[in-house]
Amino acid sequence: MSNTLFINPTALEAGLQAAFSARNKSDERHAAAFERFARAGLPNRRIEGWKWSDFNASVRALDPVEAFASDAVIAPSAFAGLKPFEIQIVNGRVVISDDERPEGLRCGVMDAMATIPELEAHGIVSLNVAMNRKALGLTVEEGVSLARPILIRHINDGAGFSFAQTLIKVDCNAKAQIIETYEGEGAGFYSHLNHMAVRDGASLQRYVMQETGASNIVHAMCAAKVDAEASFDQTSFSSGSALSRHETLVHFWGKDAEASINSAALVGDGRHSDFTSHVVFKEENCVTRQLHKGVAAGRGRNVFQGKFEVERKAQKTDAQMTANALLLSDVAEANHKPELEIYADDVECAHGSTAGALDEDALFYMRQRGLNDREARALLIEAFAGEVVGEITDEGVEAVFRAKVNEWLEAQ
Amino acid sequence: MLNIENLRVSVDGAEIIKGLSLNVPAGEVHAIMGPNGSGKSTLSYCLTGRDDYEVTGGSVALDGEDLLDLDPDERAAKGLFLSFQHPMEIPGVQTMSFVRTALNAQRKARGEDEISAADFIKLIREKAKIAGLDDAKLKRQFNVGFSGGEKKRMEMLQMAMFEPTFAIMDETDSGLDIDALKMVGDVVNALRAPSRGFLIITHYQRLLEYIQPDRVHILADGKIVKSGGAALARELEKSGYEQFIKAA
């Protein structure tokens, strides 16, 4: 690897190149990924799709070094009550619990992806692929219903940058729940790439909880391949961070499959949350429901971008997207971009997007009934975000999500 | 009980209530009747403390205590209740949970203990029966998908639950069928007590067949232009508001 990849490298680029060189001596495929990153760079606001979330501007200001291993004491997860099988990824380093594994789950460290063809133009994904030689691998065996959820805790408490990759396979007719939490008070940049295969007839429920400290910069990409008659249901909560973006890319590779992609963002002053998704319908008769609810307070910023792409072959697609934003101050922001790209002629696809303030009539009604201003506002916000939480079918997970919404409200 | 002295209220710079005085002694039911645009709803919103209703003169006191300096929830905790002309839907908020939160907020503000879950459920079921709402409605989101009549029943259920010191009913009768009107009459008559007062705002005399008012006032152009006994409402029904508007 020469130093000519970057013209006049910034301190960050030089740091990334040094880190790359240190871990990848002679692997051409990873070198190609790094070259793709070097060409694309970190996404910036001049690129459509990134205009509201400029990673280049935020990340380049960071220490151009790798985040150190942490010896911080890690408190039990809010999801501990669900008795999950826990895996921690601390500043990019994987620690698998010594707990007994649920029957039918294989778990270990394996070779990382050397390329993801559909994401080769994605700067951060290319960087992630370049940097990770090894990945966390999880396989739920055919026909197995996992008795306990898998909990992956991404804990970022360092400065500098860190990367991790997870490869998940839910084999035919298997069922699994995966909870991912993004935690930690660090001021670094963390990139996580999650590659999932949901095989024929399988069911995967994924829950994401973005609750890092205010200084964290997080990018998480979940690329899911969903096969015939499979289901992929995802519910995310984000309280944002300095800059956080959770991307979901779903490809329906088989017929009669379904997905739900729901997200609630509660973004306080100075924080930024971005939920971006892209669903590609490649086969017939697939169903998708997407609901986003975003609340921004102070100078908080809530970004939602959703795209449904229906290929010519994907007749009888049924896809609906709704995004609602609530703005709690005059300087809060909601940036929505719903998109439909349809090449099939027999489909039902719709999207709707709204933004507004709290309903003054409802507030007065509640206050006339005895609730003070703070209580009335909190109840309305809880009800607004609660629609997403209400879609969660697992009571235990739902309770934790509700508690997080209330925690956020109390902190306001 | 409720003493309004020379009240003046403006909305967006336009004076709507123009020197209104009214006394409702404890134990009495007074009716305010008036044509559209006479200031009836402005009066109910002003009494309950809604923003944007600017009091430019006069005073309002409940049992000798000035109301105008209090927030809406503080007035509610003093026992002031408004049955809304257009009750709100509150999506995402469960009916039982909302009514219980409101009841407990009022109790807490008065220094009383919160009601237990068991006592609450018993109470709300009993009151729902009186208001003519079935249990299934209580399990739904607050007023969401309710008909106009059901929303008014929900107002009456809350009035029965909260047992207010003073209740203002803003056109509770509008859009109600005969059975529902009778229900409103039953709820009010059951709550009538020497320590409690009511102000019933209406267009029509119909509701007053079920609730015998102690006094009837005619509101026109922001002022009370005539007061009388229950007979005044019947007279109005025959002769209309025209003569009183002219008098104003």
Image (cartoon, coloured by chain):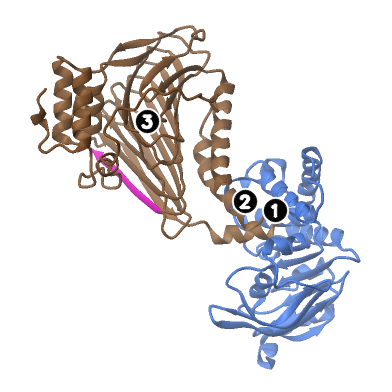
Q: Amino acid at mark 1?
A: Met
Residue B74 versus residue A172 in the image, above or below: below
The residue that mark 3 highlights is: A287
Along the polypeptide, which appears first: circle 2 or circle 1? 2
Q: Return the chain for callout 2.
A: B
Q: Return the chain for callout 1.
A: B
In space, the residues marked 3 and 1 are separated at their CA atoms by 38 Å
The residue that mark 1 highlights is: B154
CB contact under 8 Å: marks 2 and 1: yes
- What colour denotes chain A? brown
Would residue A354 appear left or right of B147 to someone viewing this image? left
Residue B112 versus residue A349 in the image, above or below: below
The verdict on residue A340 being magenta is: yes
Q: Position of residue A91 (x, y in %)?
A: 37, 25
- What colour denotes chain B? blue
Question: Is residue A313 visible from the viewing direction of this image?
Answer: no
Residue A206 versus residue B93 in the image, above or below: above
Q: Position of residue B64 (x, y in %)?
A: 83, 74
The verdict on residue B225 being magenta is: no
| Mark 3: few/some/many CA within 10 Å (<14, 14-19, 20+) | many
In space, the residues marked 2 and 3 are separated at their CA atoms by 31 Å
Would residue A362 appear left or right of A256 to someone viewing this image? right
